Image (tube, rainbow, N blue to C red):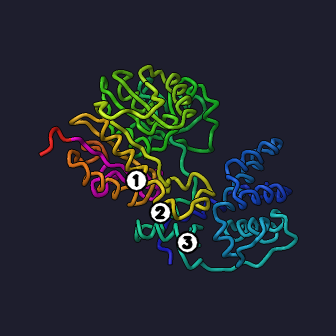
Amino acid sequence: MSTVTFNPLSRLSSQPWSALDGLGPVVSEALARILSGDPAERVLDRTLRAHRELPREGRQALKEAVFNVGLWRRRLAFLLDSEGASPPQLLFALLHGLGGVPAREAASWAGLEAPVPLRTGEPPSLALRASLPDWLADHFTRELGTEAEDFCAHLNVPGPITLRVNPARLSREALAARLASEGVATRPGSWSPLALQVEGPRPNLYGLASLREGLFEVQDEGSQLLGLLVEARPGETVLDLCAGAGGKTLQLGAAMADSGRLMAYDPDAERLDRLQQRASRAGLTRVHVLRTPPAPGLGVDRVLADVPCSELGSLRRGPDLRFRLSPDVLSRFIATQRDILARAADAVRLGGRVVYATCTVNRAENQDVVADFLRARPDFRRVPPGAGWLPEACVQDGFLFVTPHRHGTDGFFAAVLERAEAVG
């Protein structure tokens, strides 16, 4: 039985479901594509573009219907007692079974001629309650024990929109005032001194002059903590070894006060191109993009290795992500992670620092990779993360570990490793 006090279903009762009247066929067409494997974000974007005439409430109801049927599909199938239910039936089960809409209205808005019978009572397993594949629910139970139910419940609501101030341009307080003048209400983050969380309806951030001026970036608060753990300082040589499009690279550059040497590598050339554009917007001039992997012996002061992973910590960011994974994802990246961590170690100088990080909840990719590395490299030692500034609530067993149910962030793990001045 569930012991969680947080109820991810509560938000369903406050949606403008009546705006779905007449939209049943549109929703069903979008759902059919998602249930057949098309990425939900892409399907939703195309659907909204094809129906630009919809009023605000209609767009909101359509988005919520598509998002939540895609997300809750397993629990809805349980309610319907059918694994082969049609999109209109699934939508009816969402509206009536989970959203509390009266049966006749729910059937009409879903495009059904009449209501269909639904089971009552709570689903008997975590996988059904949280609408997860069985293997994934089992994995979270092994990893989190009694906290698994709460963790999975928090995966079933959208994550907050979190911004990171560019401290090279202005303070967090000044950014909050600027955003307020642009109609965006925010509040300070709970863990990162750089974070602001957007309050109220989702704004069009990309239409704001403050973003075009490089005053902030959209970045989860847990991700910001990874960048802060590097503790990059002005004048140092720093390497971001898995830079992606550069959110944390820009954070490191601001911490270095646009001085020293900041190198960024990623195997995706298009991402590096976007990084260069974003660095220019943020006013950073010392970012050096590497088009080939860094050679051993660079002697850098600090390395951030935010490695590719199973990404189980960010499942709340998309309604269909959990259903597009297979069990092999739990081990698929381990060889790559070990290789990247070894490269990071070879690049850092004596006395330098490596931050190994993932956005997953999987001991095999987190603690086990670090333990194997330390056995192979006695010239490195693990040190407490964020000593003196990181809240104790963000530390578990000497690692950074933050999750949606404990911290309101995506799930992140990090280890801070220092290269000893001498061995033996």
Mark 3 or 2, nearer chain start: 3
Q: Position of residue 245 (x, y in %)?
A: 52, 35
Mark 1 or 2, nearer chain start: 2
Residue placed at 68% from the left, 70% from the top? Answer: 76
Q: Could you give the CA–CA distance between mark 3 and mark 2, rounded to whole angstroms?
A: 15 Å
Asked whether 420 or 139 is in front, the reply is 420
Q: Residues within 10 Å of mark 2 (few under 14, many from 20)?
A: many
Per the image, the residue denoted by label 2 is 151
Q: Is residue 297 above or below residue 392?
A: above
Q: Could you give the CA–CA distance between mark 3 and mark 1, rounded to whole angstroms?
A: 24 Å
Q: Secondary structure at mark 2?
A: helix
Residue 7: quadrant of the picture: bottom right
Asked whether 28 or 366 is in front, the reply is 366
| Range shown magenta | 391-419
Q: Secondary structure at mark 1?
A: strand
The answer to if 405 sits in the magenta stretch is yes
Q: Position of residue 362 (x, y in %)?
A: 42, 60
User: In this rendering, does residue 177 appear at all?
Assistant: no
The amino acid sitting under disc 2 is Phe
User: In this rendering, does residue 46 appear at all?
Assistant: yes
Per the image, the residue denoted by label 1 is 402
- Using residue 178 as the reference point, say whether residue 242 is left or right of it: left
Q: Position of residue 310 (x, y in %)?
A: 49, 55
Per the image, the residue denoted by label 3 is 134
The amino acid sitting under disc 3 is Asp
The answer to if 34 sits in the magenta stretch is no
Q: Is residue 193 above or below residue 399?
A: above
Q: Could you give the CA–CA distance between mark 1 and mark 2, rounded to whole angstroms?
A: 11 Å
